[in-house]
Amino acid sequence: MSNDTVPKTHLFDTLKVRAGYDPKEHHYAVSPPIYQTTAYEFRDVENAKGLFSFQEAGYLYTRIGNPTVTVLEERVRILDRAAAAIGVGSGMAAISYTLLNLAEGGGRILTSPFLYGGSADSFKKIYPKLGVYFDQAKNIEHPERLAEEITPDTKAIYIESISNPSAVLLDVDAIAKVAHEHGIPLVVDNTVATPYLYNPIAHGADIVVYSATKGLSGHGNLIAGLILESGHFDFSSEKFSQFSEKYYTLRDQSGTPRSYLEVFPASPFTSRIRLNYLNYFGAALSPFDAYLAIIGLETLSERLGKQSHTAHTLAEYLSSHEAVEWVRYPALKSSPYHALYERDFARGAGGILAFGFKGTQAQREAFFDAVKLFNYHVNIGDARSLIVNSPQTTHGELEPHEKVPADVPENLIRISAGLEDPADLIADLEQAFQKALSI
């Protein structure tokens, strides 16, 4: 079914399999075809004119658009109830294109301290050289005081819906309210939650980003990213003058330059990324990777549902273990985020949990060497269960003083629950603990 014919009454599990695709438009192929082509031939001169003046929809060059990628974009757009979506070559490309599009020409981004280490490192290492600066919010968990940290040059607030690695939950509704009172958008990285567990747009987010490498595709076999816009934020203000800037490349058929707001009033944000950043920086999502993501998406609810259940089971087991100092998982009643979990996460808290290893560094390293069923590496959201020492790997970019506000102590161990039987996973952890503690 195409997105135009999907009834609004269809629910999530139907949409994740059917939305955004009409077999009649693809030679009646049941599974979306992989359009492995660089470019697309024009029907005639008038078709070329129509495409280049945006009077006609279609494809020009796979770097900026491809039918297989479009299916993925449309399916996730519908699941997120967004106005528009764009697929890019990685989650980091999704983040960088989003923030540059917002703060182009200079500006500040107010961020949560609870972020993926690569994001945090890029914020201090790359963006300042481009005139974009980041302020780590001290009151992100106290939205009633967050306004104190917004400056006239703040262009957005950036957070994660479920943080990596500690599964911190934030009051997105309250943060969105503060952002909108100050005329700035809220950007939410929804990678860990996916649209199955949480819909940021329904809670006030204006822009949503994903590393589709993770839970969305779920099999650890591709690199991809997605950016979605809600369609609710007004980018016509002076603070975001780049969206009103007229470009000759957006000219109409009479040659008159136009702005992104004029040409794409329903999707100025993602359209500007597509034709500026994706077009010229070139982090394109390949058709084959988009196809793999589409196939992975078809089992999203089954995977995330089981992974959430398994993560909760593992968290309860670890909570009573003598070798564990603490456990972080929102579904635990002892979690400081349990109230937000009960309010906002009816389908589960996701597959990510963290715990503190109570032992020496040598014992902690012996523990990792002893696991047999868990895979020891840095990905998350895989069908296989994964384990890693985040402070030394995924968040190894953070200096010791930066790990304090991020709440990433040196003994933190992160688990990404997969689809194995929880009893087998617990047995593997138990034998690893026994070997490590015997040192």
Image (spheres, helix red, strand yellow):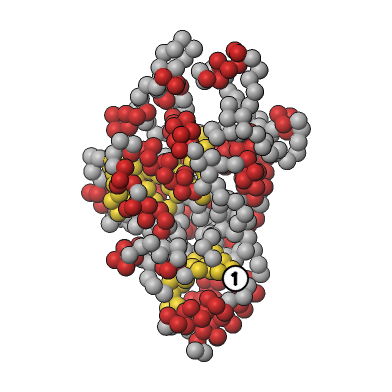
| Three-letter amino acid code of the residue under disc 1 | Phe
Mark 1: few, some, or many residues within 10 Å (few <14, many ≥20)? many
Residue at the disc numbered 1: 374
Quarter of the view holding residue 421: bottom right
Task: Identify the residue at horizontal 60%, vertical 57% (top origin).
Answer: 220
Quarter of the view holding residue 402: bottom left
Task: Identify the residue at horizontal 28%, vertical 57% (top origin).
Answer: 138
Q: Position of residue 268 (x, y in %)?
A: 44, 29
Q: Position of residue 250 (x, y in %)?
A: 45, 21
Q: Is residue 393 above or below residue 179?
A: below
Q: Position of residue 40 (x, y in %)?
A: 63, 26
- Quarter in which the N terminus is drawn: top right
Task: Identify the residue at horizontal 64%, vertical 50% (top origin).
Answer: 296
Q: How many marks?
A: 1
As rendered, which of 419 and 372 lies closer to the eye?
A: 372
Q: Is residue 78 above or below residue 268?
A: below
Task: Identify the residue at horizontal 30%, vertical 45% (top origin).
Answer: 129
State the SS at label 1: loop
Residue at the extreme top:
254
Q: Position of residue 175 (x, y in %)?
A: 35, 48
As rendered, which of 93 and 139 lies closer to the eye?
A: 93
Q: Is residue 32 above or below residue 51?
A: below
The answer, for residue 91, to whether it is visible in the render is: yes
Residue 168 appears left or right of 130: right
The answer, for residue 231, to whether it is visible in the render is: no
